[in-house]
Image (spheres, helix red, strand yellow):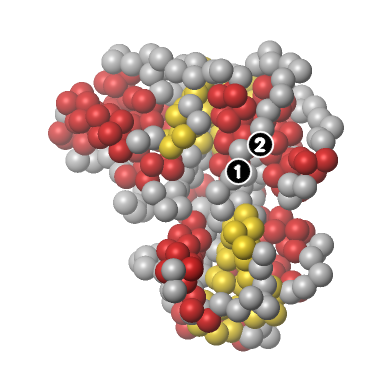
């Protein structure tokens, strides 16, 4: 489930064995720090609405593992997953099966299930040339917004991270709007031999403009890809994105963002609100939680720490110390103390949103 280093030969050898058993569709690979999931789902959903057979692979999930593999409009069923698992167990030798990580094995399941589809929208995990998703040659790469995250695997600077991610591009790419100029600089050196697809600024209708700005940008990228693929003058319905600045109650917003780059985009949305929020929060120990809280500070009245069962979660004492340094009021979160007169933002990771939603289900059943 968790690992300190990547042995790329394991997934590479596994794919070499599996690849002769299946037929891959057109592969659209999505790399970047933030926005991969929403960009991919917009793209996959519209392709499905255009009567194309499409599989969208994303990670992590919020409540159910099935969320990671979306096929033709819905999450994969347990029975289809089980069949794919059984077949994969027969195809791959035990020595490789024992070495594959959780993410690598899930990636192979998705690749197996994508066989004979028309499009595979393939979201990278950590990203970079040694990501499990990079074992297949991509027909098109989407590079979403890049920032600092997963430094222990990808590099300590934006330049290093951008270079690592962009090296996964095989032929053609589209670069989403970026915050850091360094990403453009890296593009000009790393991708000299690749074909860049120019992003078109589509005029979004009133309904689309109700989306948060970062989702509008991700939709623009998806529309650019669709135009490149030859689709024009089509109508589409926006899919509901689970956990992306989603208002699940008049006073509760949930978002799976987990790093400073996500905090920047969410802070821009909170700036337009007329009230402050109680931030229901927790963080993995390797994230820059001090920077996240600093960015959120102008828009929150209090931080409430939600309990999350994971060994990677930061020590509560460190969060409390950080809040004190930032002069932020901090308390423990109790789902049964939710108040309708307060506004809540649930933010910090997929795990934070998962923990909140499981408790919220019990709260609603009171």
Q: Position of residue 240 (x, y in %)?
A: 60, 43
- Badge 2 marks a residue whose secondary structure is loop
Q: Position of residue 121 (x, y in %)?
A: 52, 28
211 versus 116 height, above or below:
below
Q: Is residue 204 visible to us here?
A: yes
330 versus 88 height, above or below:
below
Disc marking residue 240: 1
Q: Position of residue 342 (x, y in %)?
A: 66, 77
Who's the residue at 47% across and 71% down the image? 363
Q: Nearer the viewer, residue 307 or 264?
A: 307
> What whole-number distance in Å separates the C-alpha atoms at marks 1 and 2?
7 Å
Who's the residue at 82% across and 36% down the image? 205
Who's the residue at 31% across and 51% down the image? 1
Q: Residues at badges 1 and 2 in contact (C-beta under 8 Å)?
A: yes
Q: Nearer the viewer, residue 218 or 192?
A: 218
Disc marking residue 238: 2
Q: Quadrant of residue 102?
A: top left
Q: Position of residue 105 (x, y in %)?
A: 31, 37
Q: Nearer the viewer, residue 306 or 183?
A: 306
Who's the residue at 48% across and 79% down the image? 336
17 versus 105 height, above or below:
above
Q: Is residue 6 visible to us here?
A: no
Left or right: 14 with respect to 158?
left
On-image quarter of the C terminus: bottom left
Callout 1 crowding tier (Cα within 10 Å): few <14, some 14–19, many ≥20: few
- Badge 1 marks a residue whose secondary structure is loop
């Amino acid at each position: 489930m968790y690992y300190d280093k990547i042995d790329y030969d394991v997934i590479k050898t596994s794919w070499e064995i599996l690849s002769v058993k299946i037929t891959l569709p057109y592969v659209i690979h999505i790399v970047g720090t933030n926005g991969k999931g929403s960009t991919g789902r917009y793209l996959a959903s519209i392709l499905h609405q255009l009567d194309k057979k499409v599989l969208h692979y994303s990670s992590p999930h919020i409540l159910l593992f099935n969320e990671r593999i979306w096929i033709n409009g819905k999450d994969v069923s347990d029975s289809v997953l089980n069949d794919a698992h059984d077949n994969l167990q027969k195809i791959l030798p035990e020595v490789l099966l024992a070495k594959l990580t959780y993410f690598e094995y899930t990636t192979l399941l998705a690749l197996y299930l994508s066989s004979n589809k028309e499009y595979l929208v393939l979201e990278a995990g950590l990203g970079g040339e040694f990501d499990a998703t990079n074992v297949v040659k991509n027909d098109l790469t989407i590079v979403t917004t890049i920032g600092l995250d997963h430094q222990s695997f990808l590099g300590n600077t934006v330049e290093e991270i951008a270079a690592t991610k962009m090296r996964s591009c095989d032929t053609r790419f589209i670069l989403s709007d970026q915050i850091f100029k360094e990403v453009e600089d890296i593009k000009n050196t790393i991708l000299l031999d690749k074909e860049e697809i120019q992003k078109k600024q589509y005029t979004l209708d009133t309904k689309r403009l109700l989306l948060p700005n970062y989702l509008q940008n991700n939709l623009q990228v998806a529309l650019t890809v669709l135009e490149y693929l030859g689709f024009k003058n089509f109508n589409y319905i926006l899919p509901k994105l689970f956990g992306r600045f989603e208002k699940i109650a008049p006073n509760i917003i949930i978002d799976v963002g987990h790093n400073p780059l996500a905090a920047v985009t969410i802070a821009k949305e909170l700036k337009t609100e007329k009230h402050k929020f109680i931030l229901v929060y927790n963080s993995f120990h390797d994230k820059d939680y001090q920077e996240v809280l600093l960015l959120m500070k102008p828009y929150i009245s209090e931080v409430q720490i939600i309990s999350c069962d994971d060994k990677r979660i930061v020590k509560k004492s460190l969060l409390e110390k950080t809040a004190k340094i930032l002069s932020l009021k901090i308390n423990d979160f109790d789902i049964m103390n939710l108040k309708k007169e307060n506004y809540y933002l649930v933010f910090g990771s997929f795990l934070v949103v998962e923990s909140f939603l499981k408790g919220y289900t019990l709260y609603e059943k009171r």
